[in-house]
Image (cartoon, helix red, strand yellow):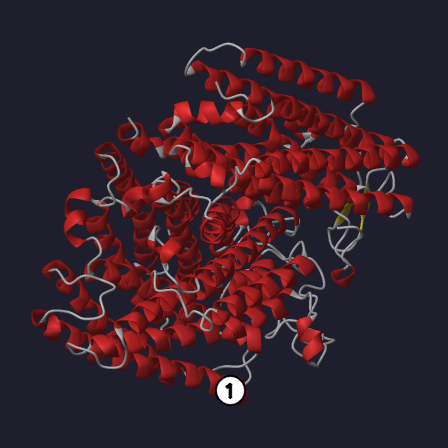
Amino acid sequence: MISEQHEHHLPYDPEGSRLGMWLFLFSELLLFGGLFILYASYLTKYTADFVIAGKELSRTIGAINTIILLVSSYFVAASITAIRRNAPRIAMLYVGSAITLGLVFLINKYFEWGHKFHLGIYPRGPALEDRTNGEVIFYGLYYCVTGLHGLHVIIGGTLLAFALYYIYRKKITAERFVFLENAGLYWHLVDLIWIFVFPLFYLVV
Amino acid sequence: MNEQKRAVSYLESASGILSWLGTSDHKRVALLYLFAASLWFLIATLLGFSLRLELMFPGKQLMTAQTYNAVFTLHGVIMIFLFLIPAIPAIFGNFIMPLQIGAKDVFFPRLNLFAWYLYMAGGLFALLSLFFDGPPDTGWTFYVPFSIMTQTNVVLTTTAAFILGFSSILTGLNFITTIHRLRTEKMGWLQIPLFTWSIYATSWVQVLATPIIGITLLLVILERVFGIGLFDPSKGGDPILYQHLFWMYSHPAVYIIILPAMGVISEIIPVAARKSIFGYKAIVGSSLGIAFAGSLVWAHHMYTSGMSDMAVLVFSFLTFIVAVPSAIKVFNWVATLYKGSIVMGPPFLLSLYFIFLFSIGGLTGLVLGAASTNIHVHDTQFVVAHFHFVMFGGTAFAFIAAVYFWFPKMFGRLYDFKNAYRGSTLLFIGFCIHYFPMFILGLQGMPRRYFDYVPRFATGNFIAGIGGMTMMIGIFLIVYNLWRGLRHGERAPQNPWGGVTLEWMLPSPPPTENFESAPEVKAYPYDFEEGKKL
Amino acid sequence: MSEKKLQHGEHEHLEESHISSYKQLLLVLFSLLVLTAITIYSASFNFGKANVWIALVIASAKSSIVVLYFMHLRYEKPVFKYMFITAIMILAIFISFIFWDLAYRYK
């Protein structure tokens, strides 16, 4: 991806590289899609319980995290503009900002989960024993979805960190930047998933 | 047709085990898969044979009921995830597809090798499940709530399946990108050979459907480890939801299993008939149609699960639709043979066996797809017979056909044809004797996944056992014959079958870089006259 | 300027495609933030079952903007767009068809 395939002298084909990345993103979409299928099913079955449990999630943190990811997506998209306009240091600044925002997101998540753990609200936790089935399922889904999402934030952040490094080492340039594009695409996926997670878990009415 | 300076073949271009384990040559990756997948096939076959021996007589023969459950689970998991799903795509898709489109390699060669390592890792996890708490006894379907409660190695096996799924996804996206971007310039979409088309359609199913089972099995693991409760009825979970999610992948998975096999047959039939394939566009369309329609019908595995009557109705109706594109292919193969100048050869014999056995499998699929008949035969031996006809009589026979067809190209050697006929025919006869009785046993009410049975089923099971033994002899002969061909076979010519697709324009075996200059592309891929070249 | 011919018909595909301006990207971000505000605001009313659908419509609008502009799909070749639609369609089929069962069982 970063250079041409030396072994077979295949020519540099960033569009093909991007195509491969999009295909991988489709598989990620379907992966989370399975969780959304479960959410849709159980929301139908346990609507009232979902509302009750959903109210216990902090809309403030959820909204802040949403804004964080949206802004970080902006930075990632802008970094491509920057590198293509021959401003690698600005590109690095933008990528670095996106990574930082990702870290803040994860820290927020850590506190969110921590707060719930403290209250005993976790699978097999004491507080869930007395709750209704629907509420237990809500939290089960909550932890699975946000947990898997958080893992993808980490992966995406790692990819961006590599991109940052490669820009610094001039391996990503105005002419060859498909690695940054692909890392960016992955990051946007992370943002996309959260765009759905936020209303479905934090804004249940 | 002759090369002045003979380029070194890919087999000789580098030596030593590291040159294989670190290769990025698609042809070597294909052989890595061939070696591993063949081993898994043989292991799973032995497991299956032990099941048949156990069932040959009433009462306990070789194993306890618990062992029986573990053996049929492993047999299914290995056959499906380690052989049927990967084999034809990862072996022949890898080796032949780039050649057919005139490419030097796949688009992501190192990702290709990585996918093989994932495949090996998945196999390793499956092996590990033999230890500690023992292999799972849930069946390869891992239905909840039992899979959540049983004290066997469900986590290890589902992890294996997860890793294997990831390998499948990466291979799929690699192939799609390759077919889009690395086709030789003059080859348009309607000049692509049918095997490559089948790989293309299959790859889409791999990319889009596999993640569903990925998340489903992950949730089973999380449920066992953390008690999340999404499928546990005592916590409000719905076990039928598990079945929905499981079959959302596993039904399309059977199309991952069969589409490449059909692609192989579509290559062999025109070559054997010396005549271009009847209805090339219809076969292309039906391949894509099967891939798409296959995503609409999953709940036909669930008619008796307790889901709503409306769902039973709708999915039964949709299932009839997906039979149509499959039938189109069978008509087209037979129509190709009509008035052709047929030349017999081992690939063609296997293709005939395939058409016969797959048709029976497909027709019995309609019995299962129709909800009214399904409720009588669900979870009986009828189902077992049906899927063995399509998966074994279908895909595995097509796999052998593919080996027979492309062996000379891949290894530069020929194998003994007469022994190939003998072994294959023994396998075919044994297959029929083994599996036909199961249809009857199923209709008579013998359940599947039962370690023992009531006395009235004894005759059918005994006959099936005879068939099983015959099959094992046939398989042994086939493998032995190929092995001898590999070691001592005479050198194969460049084009032993007179094929006209691009892989036959290369030496046997091909050089590492495949084509030195852009190959000539026919206006039509199965042009057996000296047709118009582009 | 764009393509170098290498061996037998291979081309180097250097980028000559659209570059999103900062202004366009900021506009996209602003729209996303506005839509986010709308979705939060709409959740303060109880429309019953409609709430989920409103949220999904807004989320779909936001995702479309991200996909088209941040992910640049708007400026890619048609084949990328067809592929994306295919993937979405399959997901849509999976989600909706399960309701042939659930809509009649989960009363």
| Left or right for A94, reference B339 | right
| Left or right for C63, reference A160 | left
Q: Where does label 1 land, which residue? A: B489
* Residue B503 quadrant: bottom right
For the point 60% across and 60% down, the residue is: B115
Most extreme residue toward the left is B456
**B43 is higher (above) or lower (below) than B326:** below
Count of labels in the image: 1
Pinpoint residue B20: horizontal percent, then vertical percent.
Answer: 67, 74
Q: Which quarter of the figure is the N terminus of chain C placed in?
A: top right
Q: Label 1 is placed on what type of residue?
A: Gly
Nearer to me, B306 or A61: A61
**Mark 1 crowdedness (10 Å alpha carbons): few <14, some 14-19, many ≥20:** some
Pinpoint residue B168: horizontal percent, then vertical percent.
Answer: 53, 56
Q: Is residue B273 visible?
A: no
**B10 is higher (above) or lower (below) than A204:** below
Q: Which quarter of the figure is the C terminus of chain C placed in?
A: top left
Most extreme residue toward the bottom is B488
Q: Is residue B458 visible?
A: yes
Pinpoint residue B259: horizontal percent, then vertical percent.
Answer: 42, 54
| Left or right for C28, reference A174 | left
Nearer to me, B128 or B253: B128
For the point 69% across and 17% down, the residue is: C33
**B396 is higher (above) or lower (below) than C47:** below
Pinpoint residue B207: horizontal percent, then vertical percent.
Answer: 53, 47
* Residue B110 quadrant: bottom right
**A35 is higher (above) or lower (below) than B205:** above
